[in-house]
Image (cartoon, rainbow, N blue to C red):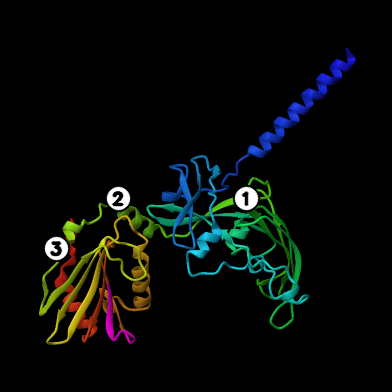
Amino acid sequence: MKNISLLTIIVTVLIILSCNAQQTQNVLPKVENHLIGEIDYTHEALELVQRQENGEEISLGKIDKEGIIYFSLPEFDIKALYDSIPLQPYPLQERLLMSNCKDKDNSTKPSFDDIYTYEYKLFVKKYGTYVAILEAVSDEKKTKNNGSGIGSIYSWFYINKAIDYKDECIKTSYNNAVEATTSVNIQFEKGWNFIEKNQVAVRKYENSKITQPEKIEFTKTSPSSKKVKWFLRQIKEDEKIQIAKKLDKLTPITKKQFEKWTPKKLGDLSVTTKEYGKSPRGQKNKNNVHLIYANEGQKKEIELYVVDCAKSPDDMNMINFAYAMENDGKDEKDIKPYVAQYNEREKAMQLLYKVEDRIIVNASGVNMNAEELWGYIKKLKVEKLLP
């Protein structure tokens, strides 16, 4: 009977330990803070995404209304992704700060030419734009000082092969005044790996807040580790989030509406080209009309795109940045409703103009100055496209 009782106790203890282990493994990470306003996850779940090197966006998970983080990390062929674009993968050694070491010739270092890897950030996307970033750190201070100082930052790595990487690298600063040691001890699994970059020691300069890393260790860990603290950091101003929210709710201008609006003439210029859905250079937004107006006798020509940013708020970033740069430090009386610059290579005047934080006019004029080009653009009466 005693043996049976002892056996029962042992089995019970093992079951309890097993259950506790399973509970530990199933613990999901949780965000330590929450942002107010449109990025408050207590109002609605937040989507986590990042754009791949080929421009395509992938979903990496979500934050629910309780602040719990659910990762949904997709498997894919990262080598095929890089082979499909004219970009070389960033070397693994450089991602882990193991290149240009003082103590060893690079030729003696492990060769990872067949390794394809990428370090992913977790962006919060809302209203069609990136509004915040979810950061994993050992201490909240690491989010406020761009990761400097003692402590750890964490990130997701994707790799195409399972490899063991253990090495050490010693570097000196440009004037040989500071020596730093970086060590890596990681057993990479094929696919997703959660990596810790631990800044173990730093050197402080006298009478300065600046610090220099002295010892860094890279290891593999778990996103559910108690050492890992998750914080949200807003990266888009409230005003721009409100603009994105407005654009996200709008119904895009249709091809029929563009065609009905398009003027046949702009003063002494006549339309020679009219096509819908051709993206401007450097953009993906196909909700636009591409127009060319010309006067062969005067050798004048205007090529322009009228782009609707409804459902595509990020397209406003470029023109808002151009406006900010153009008008920085100017008195209000000197600010023009457009941004213009002569393109020496194209031998044309370039002009950007926005209407109601929704429509962008991107124009290029040959044989005319900025004021003359602006005079033609005003004749478009782009505001008639708006309801």
261 or 54, nearer to the observer = 54
| Residue at 54% from the left image edge and 55% from the top image edge | 77
Quarter of the figure that contains the C terminus? bottom left
The answer to whether 170 is drawn above or below residue 119 in the figure is: below
- Percent coordinates x, y for residue 106 in the rendering: 72, 75
Amino acid type at circle 2 is Lys
The residues bearing labels 2 and 3 have C-alpha atoms spaced at a distance of 22 Å
Mark positioned earlier in the residue sequence (2 or 3): 2
Q: Nearer the viewer, mark 1 or mark 2?
A: 2
Residue extent of the magenta highlight: 343-352
Horizontally, is 82 left or right of 201 in the view? left
| Main secondary structure found in the magenta portion | strand
| Residue at 29% from the left image edge and 61% from the top image edge | 286
Residue 180 seen in render: no
Amino acid type at circle 1 is Lys
Amino acid type at circle 3 is Trp
State if disc 1 and disc 3 touch (CB < 8 Å).
no
91 or 161, nearer to the observer = 161
Label of residue 249 in the image? 2
Membership of 146 in magenta stretch: no
- The residue tagged 1 is 229
Query: Dot 1: few (<14), some (14–19), or many (≥20) neighbours within 10 Å?
Result: many
| Residue at 67% from the left image edge and 46% from the top image edge | 225
The residues bearing labels 1 and 2 have C-alpha atoms spaced at a distance of 35 Å
Query: Dot 2: few (<14), some (14–19), or many (≥20) neighbours within 10 Å?
Result: few
The residues bearing labels 3 and 1 have C-alpha atoms spaced at a distance of 54 Å
- Percent coordinates x, y for residue 23 in the rendering: 66, 34
Q: Secondary structure at mark 3?
A: helix
| Residue at 68% from the left image edge and 38% from the top image edge | 24
